[in-house]
Image: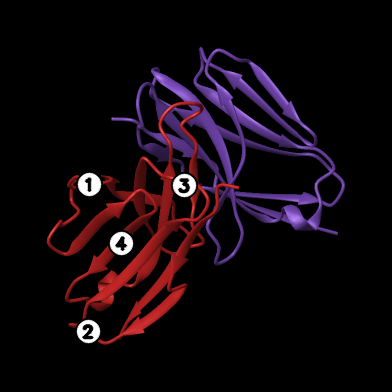
Chain colours: A purple, B red
């Protein structure tokens, strides 16, 4: 079945770039998403990328997609303490309204 | 826009009682609503998908008689945890979406259920 994997923890210094990686198995994935979850809260969509794109940039966020290797990454430039949260990668297959398959989440800790 | 609310935000109940959680799309009509469960430090596990006016589709391993889902309108879905037990304690999150576009789901803030 479909599977999405992420590393569980990342620690970076404030001002540095953070790169969170994700791999997935479903080759029919149409959209891939990055969500952010702060403690005790729901999920906030940060960005998404369509499967026929290689890269998408949105302010401090850069998403890279290697469809051949089924690898997705999220780069956060100039990481701030407010970026500390759990980041989930998710994939969605084609057609209609299909369910999202989430990775386990990467906990990003930003320290001074 | 695209705000989803959940009520209550947290609830504590005694073992054996039933608890109802509401999920509302406040400024849009949701074709589909999803219910997720999240254990501490774990990912979201999809429990069921519901479309307005039809029966929910439950994921494998989720008891439909235990977790009753009603999707009476395009803006409201409810999840009732029946005869709750301590192992049902979890963070329940709903999401809502409209078919088409980028298949984006809009998530509610979650409901923390503690069963004593």
Same chain under badges 2 and 1? The reply is: yes
Vertical order, A7 against B99 (above or below): below
For the residues beneath circles 1 and 4, the answer to whether they share a chain is yes
**Looking at the rendering, which quadrant does residue A54 occupy?**
top right
In the image, are marks 2 and 3 on the same chain?
A: no
Of badges 2 and 4, nearer the viewer stands 4
Which quadrant holds residue B86? bottom left
User: Foreground mark, 1 or 3?
Assistant: 1
Q: Which residue is mark 4?
A: B78
Mark 1 and mark 3 residues within 8 Å of each other at the beta carbon: no
Task: Depth check: give the residue in front, B70 or A83.
Answer: B70
| Structural distance between the alpha carbons of marks 2 and 4 | 20 Å
Occupied quadrant, residue B59: top left
- Count up the numbered dots: 4
Q: Which residue is mark 2?
A: B15
**Discs 2, 3 touching: Cβ within 8 Å:** no
Q: Where is mark 1, residue-wise? A: B53
Residue A104 tag number: 3
Q: Please tell me how crowded label 1 is: few (under 14), some (14-19), or many (20+) other residues with Cα within 10 Å.
A: few
- Proximity of marks 2 and 4: CB atoms separated by less than 8 Å: no
Cα gap from disc 1 to disc 3, whole angstroms: 32 Å
How far apart in space, not on screen, are marks 3 and 4 (Cα)?
26 Å
Letter of the chain that mark 1 sits on in the rendering: B
Ranked by sequence position, the earlier of labels 2 and 4 is 2
Marked residue nearer the N-terminal end (1 or 4): 1
Q: CA distance from mark 1 to mark 4?
A: 13 Å
Chain of the residue under label 4: B
Judging depth in this view, the residue of A7 and A40 nearest the camera is: A40
Q: Secondary structure at mark 4?
A: strand
């Amino acid at each position: 079945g479909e599977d999405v994997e992420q590393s569980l923890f990342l620690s970076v210094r404030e001002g540095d770039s953070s790169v969170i990686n994700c791999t997935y198995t479903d080759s029919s994935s149409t959209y891939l998403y990055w969500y952010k979850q702060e403690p005790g809260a729901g999920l906030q969509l940060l960005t998404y990328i369509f499967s026929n794109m290689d890269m998408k940039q949105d302010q401090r966020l850069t998403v890279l997609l290697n469809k051949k290797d089924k690898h997705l990454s999220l780069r956060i430039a100039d990481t701030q303490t407010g970026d500390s949260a759990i980041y989930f990668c998710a994939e969605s297959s084609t057609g209609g309204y299909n369910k999202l398959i989430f990775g386990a989440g990467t906990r990003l800790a930003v320290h001074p | 826009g695209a705000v989803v609310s959940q009520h209550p935000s947290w609830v504590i109940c005694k073992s054996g009682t039933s608890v109802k959680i509401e999920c509302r799309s406040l400024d849009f009509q949701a074709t589909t609503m999803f219910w997720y469960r999240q254990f501490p430090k774990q990912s979201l596990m999809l429990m069921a998908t519901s479309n307005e006016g039809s029966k929910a589709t439950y994921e494998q391993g989720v008891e439909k008689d235990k977790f009753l889902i009603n999707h009476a309108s395009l803006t409201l879905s409810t999840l009732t945890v029946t005869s709750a037990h301590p192992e049902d304690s979890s963070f329940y999150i709903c999401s809502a979406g409209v078919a088409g576009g980028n298949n984006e789901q809009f998530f509610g803030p979650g409901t923390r259920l503690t069963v004593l």
